[in-house]
């Protein structure tokens, strides 16, 4: 028998409890059980005026942003529309059925102002890290570091060749361009002084022109993660233009910040070959952190002549000894700021029977040595041991985090421009990822007792 619509919408009064409409296993209910934002209002109080109309509750805006990044709703206009209609979103944001949802413009005003001035999004992220630490998810023995390229909100078809451009007054008033020009005058310049960029975006000049992203060429930012390898908890996150030199430099910042904020210092750290620079390895060894990182060694010669490994280095005397027993000394002058040259004397080389196997085209032999060569040698000595192999296996967890961010959270292209916009988006993404890991522990049933 054909049924008829039995619903009625002509009732005047309803008995309705929003709490009863949210399932116990709903993601937002689980997220709410591990999220603590009671400290937020007192943290932001100095950034609000003591007079005037009451502002929108900052906790409401943070909760809405977490909903947005949890469900891949990064448009604030669309987020406000969805919170207006979705009962679960309303419940998580502490809104009743008749409560008004903030206007989307409120987020822009707060993000460009008090949210960035107070660095509140990083503090929310750090609270999530602390929650993971209390739950026993952080082992703090081994860390891993890596970066993934995210496309900037800048068209790859509209670009400026080179890095020189005369900005108009109207353009300089735009926030991304203003931030870029200010950064050029600071110590932390967004470009590599030794290698000028090939192209620049007129709308987001800080973004780097790269071939490493999902498109053959594009403007991008690097999402840098520092994770604890035990349970893949993100301990720190930072945004940089997509340049390998910037990604390596920010590793020190993340390690120092993690030790300062959480008191965590790893025994060893894993990374790919991009992090195996002499400067990076030297810094790690100096801070008693074992570098489980591949080291690029290009000293092996392919023309049959002696390589650097055929020379013996005497660290105490600071000399190299050639296969014939002659010494090579250095003046101590650093070439390109990082390389020492050890030279043999010309008479020794001219009379040497092995000259054709050592320096057939030069009057004397020169052996270059990185100022951090001792750290490079130490890192190479760790290669292949059990701890190194285990780190190489566990390091893959960071790739899964990047895959989760791109596939499930749709972090493939940024919506906000400028380095500060990239930082905001990466912090919210990492916060959601950590909270999801914390949920798995909080909602895990207790083990069944063993019957004897």
Image (cartoon, helix red, strand yellow):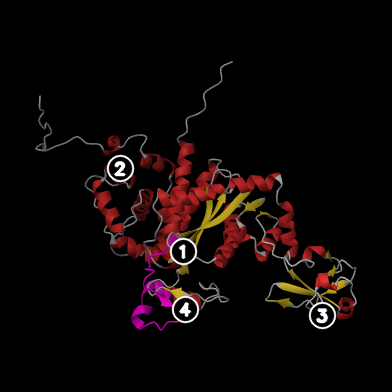
Pointer 3 local density, CA inside 10 Å: few below 14, some 14–19, many at least 20:
some
Q: Nearer the viewer, mark 2 or mark 3?
A: 3
- x then y, percent, for residue 30: 40, 39
| Front-lying residue, 367 or 178 | 367
Question: Considering depth in this image, is 290 or 256 the residue closer to the camera?
Answer: 290
Mark 2 element type: helix
The residue sitting at 33% across, 80% down in the picture is 170
Residue 305 on the magenta segment: no
Q: Which residue is found at the position 41% from the left and 49% from the top?
A: 407
Q: Secondary structure at mark 3?
A: loop
Which residue is denoted by mark 2 in the rendering? 88
Cα distance, mark 2 to mark 3? 79 Å
Left or right position of 445 against 382: left
Circle 1 residues within 10 Å: few <14, some 14–19, many ≥20: many
User: Between marks 1 and 4, how big is the CA–CA gap?
Assistant: 17 Å
Residue with the mark numbered 4? 163
Q: Position of residue 354 (x, y in %)?
A: 86, 70
Of labels 1 and 4, earlier in sequence is 4
Residue at the spot of label 3? 363
Mark in the foreground, 3 or 1: 3
Judging by the rendered image, the residue that carries numbered circle 1 is 221
The answer to whether residue 30 is left or right of residue 446 is: left
- Indicate the secondary structure of the residue bearing disc 4: loop
Give the structural element (helix, strand or loop) at label 1: strand
């Amino acid at each position: 028998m054909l049924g008829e619509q039995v619903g009625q919408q002509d009732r005047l009064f309803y008995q309705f409890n929003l709490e009863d409409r949210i399932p116990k296993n709903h993601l937002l209910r689980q997220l709410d059980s591990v999220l603590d934002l009671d400290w937020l209002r007192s943290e932001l109080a100095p950034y609000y005026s003591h007079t005037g109309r009451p502002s929108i509750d900052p906790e409401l805006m943070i909760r809405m942003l977490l909903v947005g990044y949890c469900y891949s709703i990064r448009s604030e206009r669309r987020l406000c529309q969805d919170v207006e209609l979705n009962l679960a979103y309303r419940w998580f944001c502490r809104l009743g059925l008749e409560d008004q949802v903030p206007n989307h413009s409120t987020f822009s005003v707060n993000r460009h102002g008090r949210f960035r001035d107070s660095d509140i999004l990083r503090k929310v992220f750090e609270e999530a890290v602390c929650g993971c630490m209390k739950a026993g998810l952080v082992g703090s023995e081994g860390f891993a570091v890596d970066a993934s390229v995210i496309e900037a909100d800048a068209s790859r078809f509209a670009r400026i060749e080179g890095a020189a451009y005369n900005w108009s007054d109207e353009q300089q008033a735009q926030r991304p361009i203003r931030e870029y020009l200010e950064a050029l005058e600071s110590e932390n310049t967004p470009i590599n002084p030794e290698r000028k960029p090939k192209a620049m975006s007129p709308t987001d000049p800080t973004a780097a022109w790269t071939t490493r992203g999902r498109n053959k060429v594009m403007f991008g930012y690097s999402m840098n993660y520092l994770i604890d390898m035990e349970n893949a908890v993100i301990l720190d996150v930072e945004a940089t233009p997509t340049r390998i030199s910037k990604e390596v430099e920010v590793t020190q910042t993340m390690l120092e910040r993690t030790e300062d904020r959480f008191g965590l210092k790893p025994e060893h750290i894993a990374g790919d070959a991009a992090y195996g620079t002499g400067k990076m390895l030297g810094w790690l060894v100096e801070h008693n952190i074992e570098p489980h990182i591949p080291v690029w060694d290009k000293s092996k010669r392919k023309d049959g002549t002696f390589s650097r490994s055929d020379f013996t280095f005497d660290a105490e005397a600071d000399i190299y000894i050639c296969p014939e027993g002659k010494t090579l000394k250095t003046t101590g002058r650093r070439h390109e700021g990082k390389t020492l040259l050890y030279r043999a004397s010309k008479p020794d080389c001219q009379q040497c029977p092995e000259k054709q196997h050592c320096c057939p085209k030069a009057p004397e032999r020169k052996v270059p040595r990185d100022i951090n060569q001792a750290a490079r040698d130490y890192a190479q000595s760790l290669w292949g041991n059990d701890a190194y192999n285990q780190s190489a296996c566990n390091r893959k967890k960071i790739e899964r985090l990047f895959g989760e961010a791109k596939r499930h959270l749709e972090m493939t292209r940024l919506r906000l421009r400028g380095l500060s916009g990239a930082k905001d988006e990466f912090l919210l993404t990492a916060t959601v990822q950590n909270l999801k890991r914390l949920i798995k522990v909080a909602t895990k049933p207790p083990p069944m007792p063993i019957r004897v």
